[in-house]
Image (cartoon, rainbow, N blue to C red):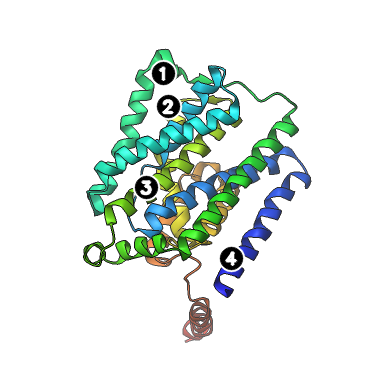
Amino acid sequence: MRRLTVPNVLFSIWVVVLCMLPFVESSYYMHLATNIALFTILAQSWNFIGGFSGYPSFSTAAFFGLGAYAGAITQNMGLPMELAWIFATVLVSALAALFGFILLRLRGHYFAIGSIAIVEVLRLSIASATDLTGGGNGLNVRFLPGGPEYVGMVFLYTMVGLMVLVFALTVWVDKSRFGFGLRCIRQNEDAANMVGINTNLYKIIAYVLSASFCGTVGAIYASWAGYIDPTDSFEILLTLKVPVMAMLGGAGTVMGPVLGAAAFSLLEEIFWANFLEYNRAILGVVIVILIFFLPRGLLKLDYHTLYRRLLHYAVRNPRERSE
């Protein structure tokens, strides 16, 4: 019960903080809170396939971009915004099931390469369909009627609401037989097969769960931004940032993606504001730190041991310099 309660309380506090940010000062905080919620959803979504089951998926940008275009096109055709989001989610889920059926037969770096290939295939396909998507010129999306503050509030609370939904689903997966099966796959897939777990089905479900929420976020983002293009929607950097966020907090945990997305987004915002020319370097630095110092993420770090080591170094170092 304690393990379930602590993440819930911490997450609830974080939701309140995000919801209150717009009332602090300006529209900047509303935009920041919406971005944090967006990346939190993407990190939580990746956690289903990359964290619980241990399959390093790099197709986040593919499903995000596909959802953005599916939502934008249907919305421009006259479908109500909310129904356009639902349509995008269903379409992305169906294609993810198809891609998953093919790709999830691969393992390790073969699966990773295949998942990256999906991003480029979909990006080139969207860019080529100029009559439907606008090609490289991009696509304008009808804005939601209302003033900037009202529109900003709508999309902020929509993102936060979806973030809460994905968190609740993550809690359920963590405690369920399905989550246990995914962890067995991560530990030893062959052994999981031998004890009767339908590993192919479990992996496809996790992959579809991951993709469907990426598609929903993409559709909401298109309505929020008012303009999308293939380069931005299928940005390869996005497909790298999201796994880094999840692993930074702790992949395969309930709160890890939430913590990682918040920490990474805030750190990136600081770099954007003060060190614009070095902003892209932040991703490389975080990856290096993850590999060498935080392989299990912030949540699984032994802070007591770290504190003792830092204290030992601080005490020893002055002595060495004096000698």
Q: Which mark is residue 76?
A: none
Per the image, label 2 sits on a secondary structure element best described as helix
First reached walking from the N terminus: tag 3 or tag 2? 3
Q: Is residue 292 left or right of residue 169?
A: left
First reached walking from the N terminus: tag 1 or tag 3? 1
Residue 174 or residue 270, whichever sits in front: 174
Question: Where does label 4 land, which residue?
Answer: 7
x, y percent for residue 82: 59, 31
Where is 4 relative to 322, above or below?
above
- From mark 3 to mark 2, how far is it between C-alphas? 23 Å
x, y percent for residue 240: 40, 46
Q: Identity of the amino acid at label 1?
A: Gly
Question: Where does label 2 land, which residue?
Answer: 230
**Is label 1 or label 4 in front?**
4
Per the image, label 1 sits on a secondary structure element best described as helix
Question: Where does label 1 land, which residue?
Answer: 135
First reached walking from the N terminus: tag 2 or tag 1? 1
Residue shown at the point (51%, 62%) measured from the top left: 254
Residue 235 visible in the shown view: no
Which corner quadrant of the image does residue 296 belong to? bottom left
- From mark 2 to mark 1, how far is it between C-alphas? 7 Å
- From mark 4 to mark 2, how far is it between C-alphas? 37 Å
Per the image, label 4 sits on a secondary structure element best described as helix
Residue at the outermost front position: 196
Tell me the crowding category of disc 4: few under 14, some 14 to 19, or many 20 or more residues within 10 angstroms, Cα based. some
- From mark 4 to mark 3, how far is it between C-alphas? 24 Å
Question: Where does label 3 land, which residue?
Answer: 207
**For the residues bearing labels 3 and 2, Cβ distance under 8 angstroms:** no
First reached walking from the N terminus: tag 1 or tag 4? 4
**For the residues bearing labels 2 and 1, Cβ distance under 8 angstroms:** yes
Q: Is residue 243 left or right of residue 55?
A: right
Residue shown at the point (35%, 30%) measured from the top left: 122
